[in-house]
Image (spheres, rainbow, N blue to C red):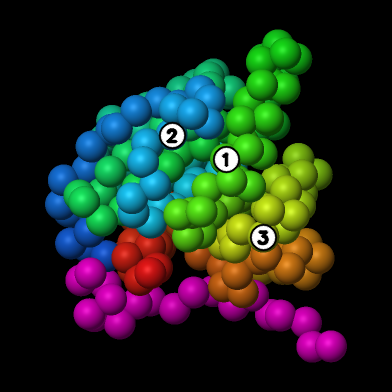
Amino acid sequence: MTALPFPLAPVPEPDAAERGRLMFAGPVEFVKGVVAMEGLPPADRGEVCFAGRSNVGKSSLINALTGRKNLARASNTPGRTQEINYFALGESRYLVDLPGYGFAEAPVAVVARWQALLKAYLGGRATLRRAFVLIDMRHGIKPVDEEILTLLDRAAVPFQTVLTKADKVKAADREKVLAQVRAALQKHPAAYPELVVTSAEKGDGIETLRGIIAGLE
């Protein structure tokens, strides 16, 4: 069996790039923070979710995608976001910010509650089109990431790996990290076979990611 190479996602064609730009340039509103499945908004449109360990740069990436500095609140305290946060991209799509995982300072009972909510959401949201799993490019895929990837496999939720903070990694080290990520993803049948490399600070990969999200039916 030929292994998937997990190439970098190509820069979108002009039409696709424009669809992505328009989707994120339009109204983007915070809808609600959800702490239990019964609090989820109506499943009346497709949605994408962003998952990643604490301090991976998730809030910064969401802010870069939407062009809003403070839409998703970045925190210096890992694990502070305790809710599933819903944002509406106009009338067409929900963008869902999942609680960070892998935090060490939160109480055990709180962590267990967040993990249960995460599992329930990933396994039970029919309108979820794709999960984007954020991986810090300085560190690659860690054991704590493997847990969420395995959960996505079991829930049969397609996920795409997005590498963050690419500007913090020297060009000479990038291929080593990409090789580690590609090797780790071979074990995950739900992994979409393209990687996205991003920098929220420099804008790298933002157009590509917008185009991918806008192209999901």
Pointer 1 with pointer 2, Cβ within 8 A: yes
Residue labelled with disc 2: 40
Q: Say which amino acid is labelled 3.
A: Ala
Query: Which residue corresponds to the image point at 78% horizontal and 82% vertical from the top-left?
Result: 3
Mark sitting on residue 165: none
Q: Is 13 inside the magenta-drawn segment? A: yes
Residue labelled with disc 1: 121
Residue labelled with disc 3: 156
Q: Is 214 inside the magenta-drawn segment? A: no
Mark 1 secondary-structure assignment: helix
Query: Which residue corresponds to the image point at 26% horizontal and 72% vertical from the top-left?
Result: 17
Measured in 3D between alpha carbons, the distance from the residue under mark 1 to the one under mark 3, in whole angstroms, is 12 Å
Mark 2 secondary-structure assignment: loop
Extent of the magenta region: 1-19
Compared with 115, 124 (above or below) is: below
Q: Say which amino acid is labelled 2.
A: Leu
Q: Say which amino acid is labelled 1.
A: Tyr
Q: Indicate the position of residue 194 as horizontal and vertical percent values.
A: 57, 73
Residue 173 appearing in the image: no
